[in-house]
Amino acid sequence: MRVALPDRPGSLAQITRVLGTAGADITQFTVLDRGAGRAVDDITVFCPEGTPKQVLLKSLTSVEDVTVEGIWTTREAPGTYPELEILKYITTAGDRALTTLIDSLPVLFSADWAATATADAGPERGVVYASWRAPREVRLPDDVPPRPTALTLDGDLHVIHAPLPPLALTLLLARSDGPAFHRIEVHRLSRILEIFLSLPATERSVARQLRK
C-alpha cells in the first residue's frame, strides 16, 4: 500500500496500530518522499487469506490527514536486502543473467510482470523474454525513452519503460493494480540496470542467449 501522511512524530504509530487491528502484519516499510510536512511511504503487509482491500482502506482512512494512494496485491514480497540478493544471483547466472533480471524485477517492485524486447521502432517489436505473468502479446510504447521513464498506458497500466543501449534492447516493468510508479522507484530501477549493464559478462551472456 502507498500512503501519504503528516511527517510528524506519532503518525506512523497510528498507521501501524490500525493495520494491526485489521489483522495486517507489516513486513516492509519504504520511505519514498518527504517534504512540506508530508511523507509518502510504501508499506508491505501480510494479511490473512481473503482479507478485503476495503478493510485496509477503511482502517487507514480512519487516521487523520492520511491519504491512501493505492492498495495492491503482490505475489511475493521483497526480502531484507532485495537488490543485493538479486544482483548476487545475476552475477552467477551465466547465460541466464538477463532472464534472472526480468524474473526478479516484479518481485523487487511489487509489480505484475516485466519484459524485454528489441529496441527497433514500433509497438510490436520482438519480445526477447517476459516474466511468467506477462500477457501473451506484450505491446511496448512506440518510442524508446533516453532514460528510464514512468508512464501510464491505455487501460491504466502503469509502467517503467527503460532503454538498454549496450544490448540494443528495451525493458518494460508493469503494474496493473495500485498507484503509478514513483520517481524513487524509477531511480531504483535505473541504478539496478546501471549495475547490471556494467557487469563484465552481461553483453556476452545476452548475446549467447539471443542466438539460442
Image (tube, rainbow, N blue to C red):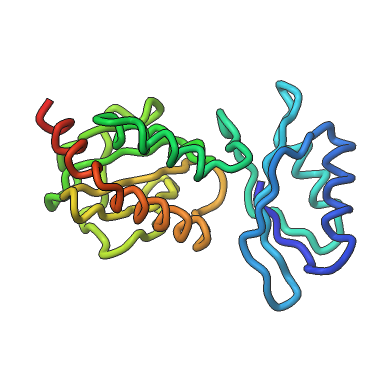
Q: At x 30% / y 53%, what residue is drawn?
A: 198
When asked about the image quadrant of residue 145, the answer is bottom left
* 140 relative to 53 in the view: left or right: left
Of residues 20 and 88, the one nearer the viewer is: 88
Q: Position of residue 144 (x, y in %)?
A: 23, 57
Q: Position of residue 101 (x, y in %)?
A: 37, 38
Of residues 192 and 34, the one nearer the viewer is: 192
Q: Position of residue 83 (x, y in %)?
A: 50, 45
Q: Residue furthest left?
A: 211
Of residues 157 and 195, the one nearer the viewer is: 195
* 112 relative to 71 in the view: left or right: left
Q: At x 64% / y 43%, what residue is drawn?
A: 71
Q: At x 56% / y 45%, what residue is drawn?
A: 178
Q: Is residue 4 visible?
A: yes
When asked about the image quadrant of residue 99, the answer is top left
Q: Is residue 122 above or below residue 76?
A: below
